[in-house]
Amino acid sequence: MQFLWWEVLLVKQTGQIISEKQKLTELSSTNANFIKQEVEKLHQKKLTQTIMIVGEGTVFLLLLLFGIYKIKQAHTKEQELNSQQKNFFLSITHELKTPIAATKLQLQTLQKHKLDITIQKELISNALVENERLNNLIDNVLLANRLDSGEFIFKKENENISELIETILHRYYESEIKKNELQLLIEKNIFLQVDVNVFPSIITNLIDNAIKYSFNEKQIIIGLKKINHKLVLTFSDLGCGILDADKKKIFTKFFRAGNEETRTTKGTGLGLYIVNYLVKQHKGAILVKNNLPSGSIFEISF
């Protein structure tokens, strides 16, 4: 409003100056043609100056509004980042404490009580599972940091990813495979240029998510096949699915649907961010689709 009022005042002032000059011209000469020419020049000058004032004022106003918009945009992003970081720290604290506390309890039980060998083996096995979970969490955090800093150097080799994926699945998810919760539909002898040190993170993060969000029925299918000149890797589940509004955000660092203080599922908001980054580094693309009757399908094409 200040800019608009400034424009109005300048236009009025210009009009007054032109009017005074016109009066002076009329008083200083008796030649009608000369007076007419001078008056026309003054009116043209008034029009030019009015256009200039309005144009400059409008440009200044637009620049000011654009600046306000960019500041608002930056402030909103900062608030979102702060919220995501708060959620991440709440989550990471919980994720670190849980396996540490569980392992400590199991070791204390072994230390204080003389237990049957079967129970001892079960407690040791549970402690190792918790330790593996803690190790995977730390690996994810460290990997995300290295990817962000640009320190990580990818070393790709032509690998039989059919065998690589099966090895990963049997190493980490043998229990789920035996219970038929995890099914493999993998074509044999498919080769791809991959970094074997980080490629497993794509597999484990997507399967962990599928298990985590399959609250009722666990039926996870991992497929790998050639379609024309593409390799397509899919992960489908019958879990709770993903809202359409969140599908564009799930690959953002720290993003998790809901609030960390009320969410019951575990996670740090790093898994899908890492997956997306690694897929792009392997010249692939990932998209998420709805599964029927429920759940999600993550499809990666190379």
Image: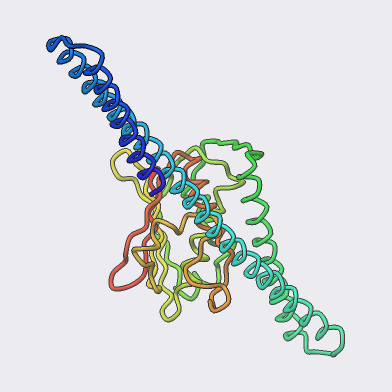
Question: As displayed, is residue 169 above or below residue 262?
Answer: above
Q: How many marks?
A: 0
163 left or right of 287 in image: right
- Residue beneath the point at 40% across and 74% down: 240
Q: Nearer the viewer, residue 31 or 63?
A: 31
Q: Give the percent coordinates (x, y) of residue 190.
A: 42, 44
Answer yes or no: is residue 194 visible: yes
- Residue beneath the point at 68% across and 52% down: 142
- Residue beneath the point at 42% across and 66% down: 183
Question: As displayed, is residue 254 above or below residue 282?
Answer: below
Q: Give the percent coordinates (x, y) of residue 28.
A: 26, 13
20 left or right of 171 in image: left
- Single out the residue that lies furthest toward the right: 112
| Coloration mode | rainbow
Quarter of the view holding residue 108:
bottom right
Identify the image quadrant of the C terminus. top left
Q: Give the percent coordinates (x, y) of residue 187.
A: 39, 51
Q: Nearer the viewer, residue 193 or 206?
A: 206
- Single out the residue that lies furthest toward the left: 33
Q: Give the percent coordinates (x, y) of residue 292.
A: 28, 69
- Residue beneath the point at 70% across and 73% down: 99
Q: Which of 7 and 253 is in front in this view?
A: 7
Answer yes or no: is residue 204 visible: no
